[in-house]
């Protein structure tokens, strides 16, 4: 979403979530492009939707409005036959004792965001790019307190800590991250947005996630390869064909929901969708 908003003119330090209200046509067009490419699940433009993050744009008082609009725009762009995932990203700091924010304060902030996403039409809640299982757990608890019927997905961001080994930046292993999320009530677990991971790394990470998750379905949303900087811009070099090949490999190791994170354009997802549905 961030990449697509920038391509449509989002300025540095501008709040992308505000576009759900000020430029809903542009946000809706992004959703429709992915939906037309074959995506069954569409993610709302609400990654930084807690009051903690919105406060940095002087928009903390508009949490309910902006998140409800995010879900409504995604709902309109997805149609009734697709699924809208209400996107909940990190709150931007650390919980106690590393930071000053208490679990109760964060739970309340997540609850405000999630309640608005559900009111706007979200079918499920995606608690994503987590690095601390404690934050992920608070997100699950907040979602479940808003609605016991709405599925909750938790995805972590991992990096390679050793050959064949992956951890979050907090040092959390794949097994611990997954098992703690499941114990908290997550219905689906997985990963998105790994740090400096190759496409083959995502396949191996998917294999480990499936092993750790047991009967719980696993989702993997790889970046379009490991980015490189060019003129201060992140460039993702993986082609749609390479992403399609990776999607089939992920399917082969037992991953059941496959998507894309940073750098994955509608063309990437269209190629992945065709490959998966042909298989």
Image (tube, helix red, strand yellow):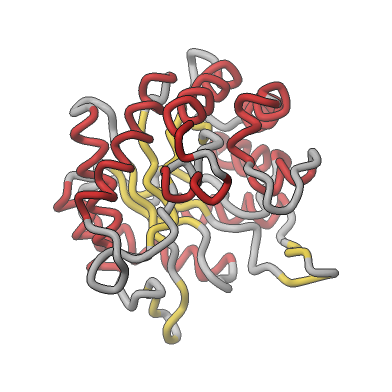
Residue at 66% of width from left, 23% of height from top? 24
Q: Nearer the viewer, residue 105 or 206?
A: 105
Whole-percent x, y for residue 216 in the image: 24, 47
The residue at the far bottom in this view is: 162
User: In the image shown, does 145 or 15 lie closer to the viewer?
Assistant: 15
Q: Can residue 37 be seen in this view?
A: no
How many numbered circles does the render carry?
0
**Residue 178 occupies quadrant:** bottom left
**Residue 252 spot, x, y in % from top left:** 44, 54
Q: Looking at the image, which is closer to me, 42 or 59? A: 59
Direction right: furthest residue: 231
Q: In this view, does 247 lie to the left or right of 26?
A: left
At 65% from the left and 32% from the top, the residue drawn is 19
Task: Say left or right for 37 vs 202.
Answer: right
Q: Residue 148: give x, y in percent of width and height.
A: 18, 28
Quadrant occupied by the N terminus: top right
Give me the residue at 36% from left, 24% from top: 118
Asked if residue 124 shows in the view, the reply is: yes
Q: Which residue is drawn at 50% across and 64% down?
A: 202
**In the figure, 261 relative to 69: above or below?**
below
Q: In this view, does 7 lie to the left or right of 76?
A: right
Residue 223 falls in which quadrant of the image?
bottom right
Q: Where is residue 110 in the image (x, y as percent from the top left)?
A: 32, 42
């Amino acid at each position: 979403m961030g990449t697509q908003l920038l391509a449509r003119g989002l300025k540095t330090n501008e709040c992308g979530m505000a576009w759900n209200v000020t430029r809903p046509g542009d946000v809706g067009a992004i959703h429709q492009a992915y939906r037309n490419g074959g995506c069954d699940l569409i993610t709302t433009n609400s990654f930084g939707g807690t009051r903690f993050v919105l406060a940095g744009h002087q928009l903390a008082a508009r949490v309910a409005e902006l998140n409800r609009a995010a879900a409504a725009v995604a709902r309109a762009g997805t149609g009734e036959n697709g699924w809208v995932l209400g996107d909940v990203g990190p709150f931007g700091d650390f919980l106690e004792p590393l930071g000053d924010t208490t679990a109760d304060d964060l739970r309340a902030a997540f609850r405000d965001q999630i309640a608005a996403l559900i009111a706007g039409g979200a079918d499920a809640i995606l608690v994503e790019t987590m690095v601390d299982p404690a934050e992920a757990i608070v997100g699950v608890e907040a979602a479940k307190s808003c609605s016991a019927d709405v599925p909750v997905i938790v995805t972590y961001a991992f990096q390679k800590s050793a050959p064949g080994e992956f951890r979050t930046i907090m040092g959390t292993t794949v097994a611990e991250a997954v098992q703690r999320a499941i114990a908290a009530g997550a219905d689906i677990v997985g990963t998105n947005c790994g740090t400096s991971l190759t496409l083959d790394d995502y396949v191996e990470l998917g294999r480990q996630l499936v092993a750790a998750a047991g009967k719980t379905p696993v989702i993997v949303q790889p970046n379009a390869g490991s980015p490189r900087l060019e003129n201060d811009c992140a460039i993702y070099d993986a082609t749609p064909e390479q992403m399609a090949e990776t999607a089939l490999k992920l399917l082969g190791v037992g991953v059941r929901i496959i998507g894309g994170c940073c750098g994955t354009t509608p063309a990437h997802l269209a190629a992945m969708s065709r490959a998966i549905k042909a298989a």
